[in-house]
Image (spheres, grey):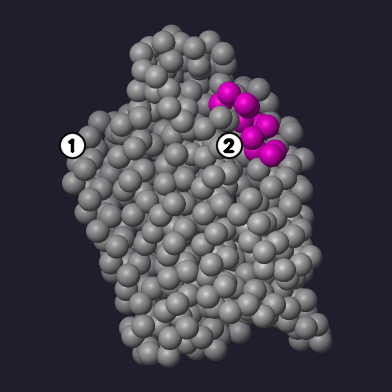
């Protein structure tokens, strides 16, 4: 049996179509909730009375906790069951939202942020993405993977954009009606918890087609002839190399997560929540379009080339944002950056899926995602230290550091995988 045989049996069946649709729906709901919360999370914590230092610590521990939870769940998902793993993750999202909504006790919030699933960035956190990618890769052909991942990321970006827009608009309306700001922000947190409950119910309806069959797992392990580690066997080396590179990119990205950028606009230009929502609505719409275009570009120039040659100019634009003399130019450069910044995402995801066996996919996606979480865990707290400064130069430091390190990542990625880029492009576009 070839590696593609299991996926070739399933496409076109009603189970395949239903599973793909359901995974797109859960992606939309989850990313809407992430976008809904991310624009207001730092403002909410600030209104609760926490200092910038404590907020930064909380954001960092949120990402640090994601490392342990994601590693545990993703490296066992193919054995424990992908559906079960997704349901457990949804419960953790629900629990974290409830705690954040009910208490202002810093230690309880730290515990919820560490154990639960909270997204301060508007981006994916927890085991969801890794397991969903593996499930999708299991019910579609290799040839369609990057294309499907492009649409999958478009749906996510669109949902994040709508969530950001709804969050800013709804809280602004509630504040205009006389509700205290902290209570309007708390409403967004309750909405986040509700999304976790909905996801837990929806994942029950995934079919067995998304799971690894026993004969696939045993056959792949025998063929690999290597001892498994963290759910990986013969692909340990390439996954380790990719993970190291992705951690650099994520560390850089942690300086400019959506909550941090929103807070910078608030400090620098006194932007109101409704306008913040509108800014990130537009940014995420542009990101969605760029993700969709990635599969067509990858088919022409390859996965690695697409990842690098679209990421480099977007990082130059990131560095330019704080150098803009007024709000509107800063918004324009930010939006231009988002118009190309996400083209590396579906190509990166597809590349990881292309270099591992089917029974390694959840683990490979999980390990590389955890590497990104490790990289991103420290930088938000460093970024908030810069935002507490009065110097305009230091206030813009998160953009300078983040963009500069991302450029270093792009160059290292190209150098490390340039020899293999043609093979990967031929296999998975």
Q: Which quadrant, please, contains the N terminus?
A: top left
Number of labels in the image equals 2
Q: Is residue 111 left or right of residue 137?
A: right
349 up-or-down from 398: above or below: above
The residue drawn where x is 66% and y is 74% is 44
Residue, disc 2: 73
* Magenta-colored stretch includes residue 84: yes
Residue 92 place in picture, x, y as percent: 69, 47
Q: Is residue 286 left or right of residue 400?
A: right
Q: Earlier in the sequence, mark 1 or mark 2?
A: 2
Residue 376, quarter of picture: bottom left
Residue, disc 1: 419
The residue drawn where x is 46% and y is 45% is 369
| Front disc: 1 or 2 | 2
Q: Main secondary structure of the magenta part?
A: helix
Q: Is residue 56 left or right of residue 383?
A: right
Specify the segment rendered in magenta: 78-88
* Magenta-colored stretch includes residue 107: no
Q: Residues within 10 Å of mark 1 (few under 14, many from 20)?
A: few
């Amino acid at each position: 049996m070839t590696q593609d045989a299991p996926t070739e049996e399933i496409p076109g069946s009603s189970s395949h179509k239903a599973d793909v649709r359901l995974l797109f729906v859960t992606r939309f709901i989850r990313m809407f909730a992430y976008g809904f919360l991310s624009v207001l999370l730092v403002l909410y914590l600030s209104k609760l009375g926490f200092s910038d230092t404590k907020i930064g610590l909380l954001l960092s521990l949120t990402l640090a906790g994601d490392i342990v939870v994601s590693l545990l769940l993703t490296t066992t998902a193919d054995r424990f069951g992908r559906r079960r793993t997704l349901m457990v993750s949804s419960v953790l999202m629900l629990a974290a939202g409830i705690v954040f909504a009910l208490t202002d006790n810093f230690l309880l919030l730290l515990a919820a942020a560490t154990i639960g699933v909270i997204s301060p960035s508007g981006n994916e956190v927890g085991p969801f993405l890794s397991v969903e990618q593996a499930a999708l890769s299991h019910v579609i052909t290799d040839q369609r993977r990057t294309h499907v991942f492009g649409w999958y990321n478009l749906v996510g970006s669109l949902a994040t954009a709508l969530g950001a827009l709804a969050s800013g608009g709804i809280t602004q309306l509630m504040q205009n009606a006389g509700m205290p700001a902290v209570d309007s922000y708390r409403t967004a947190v309750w909405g986040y918890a509700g999304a976790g409950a909905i996801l837990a119910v929806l994942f029950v309806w995934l079919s067995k087609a998304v799971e690894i069959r026993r004969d696939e797992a045993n056959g792949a392990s025998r063929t690999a002839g290597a001892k498994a580690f963290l759910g990986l066997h013969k692909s340990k080396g390439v996954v380790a190399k990719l993970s190291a590179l992705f951690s650099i990119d994520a560390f850089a990205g942690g300086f400019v997560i959506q909550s941090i950028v929103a807070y910078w606009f608030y400090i620098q230009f006194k932007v109101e929540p409704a306008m913040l929502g509108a800014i990130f609505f537009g940014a995420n719409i542009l990101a969605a379009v760029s993700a969709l275009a990635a599969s067509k570009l990858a088919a022409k120039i390859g996965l690695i080339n697409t990842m690098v040659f679209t990421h480099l100019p977007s990082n130059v634009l990131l560095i330019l944002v704080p150098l803009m003399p007024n709000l509107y130019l800063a918004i324009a450069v930010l939006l231009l950056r988002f118009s190309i910044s996400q083209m590396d995402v579906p190509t990166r995801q597809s590349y990881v899926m292309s270099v591992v066996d089917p029974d390694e996919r959840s683990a490979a996606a999980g390990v590389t995602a955890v590497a990104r979480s490790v990289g991103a865990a420290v930088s938000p707290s460093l970024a908030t230290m810069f935002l507490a400064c009065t110097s305009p130069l230091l206030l813009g430091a998160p953009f300078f550091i983040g963009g500069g390190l991302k450029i270093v990542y792009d160059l290292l990625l190209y150098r490390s995988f340039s020899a293999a880029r043609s093979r990967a492009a031929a296999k998975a576009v």
